[in-house]
Amino acid sequence: MGYPKTEREARARSERKLRSIEKRARAMLLEIAAFWDEGQVTGQIDLTLENLERDLGAIRECMDEEIRAHEEDEVHA
């Protein structure tokens, strides 16, 4: 699989990888949480999952902004 030719292709590939990261991280963190009674550890894991979701969403937003900016530049060129 070569380098993406367009920003939209890069976005699609990146999205697949972000979903994979999220799925793996969630599964591993929930597995860790199962080792512990509800308390500080599981609370921190919950917070980490929330932060992960937020941060991955921010990456997605940045990708979309770059695509929009590039498309606007092409229109004005």
Image (cartoon, helix red, strand yellow):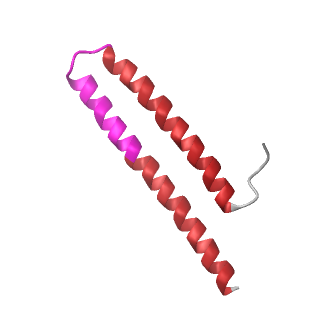
Tell me the quarter of the image containing the C terminus. bottom right
Count of residue discs: 0
Magenta residues (range): 35-53
The residue at the point 55 percent across, 59 percent down is 63
Is 77 rendered above or below residue 9? below
Q: Position of residue 67 (x, y in %)?
A: 60, 67
Q: Quadrant of residue 32?
A: top left
Q: Is residue 74 left or right of residue 2?
A: left
Q: Is residue 43 left or right of residue 22?
A: left
The residue at the point 46 percent across, 47 percent down is 56
Is 8 rendered above or below residue 2? below
Q: Position of residue 71 (x, y in %)?
A: 63, 74
Q: Is residue 5 left or right of residue 43?
A: right
* Furthest residue in direction left, as rendered: 39
Q: Is residue 43 magenta?
A: yes
* Furthest residue in direction top, as rendered: 35
The residue at the point 58 percent across, 73 percent down is 69
Is 5 rendered above or below residue 15? below
* Furthest residue in direction bottom, as rendered: 76
The residue at the point 48 percent across, 33 percent down is 23
Q: Main secondary structure of the magenta part?
A: helix
Tell me the quarter of the image containing the N terminus. top right
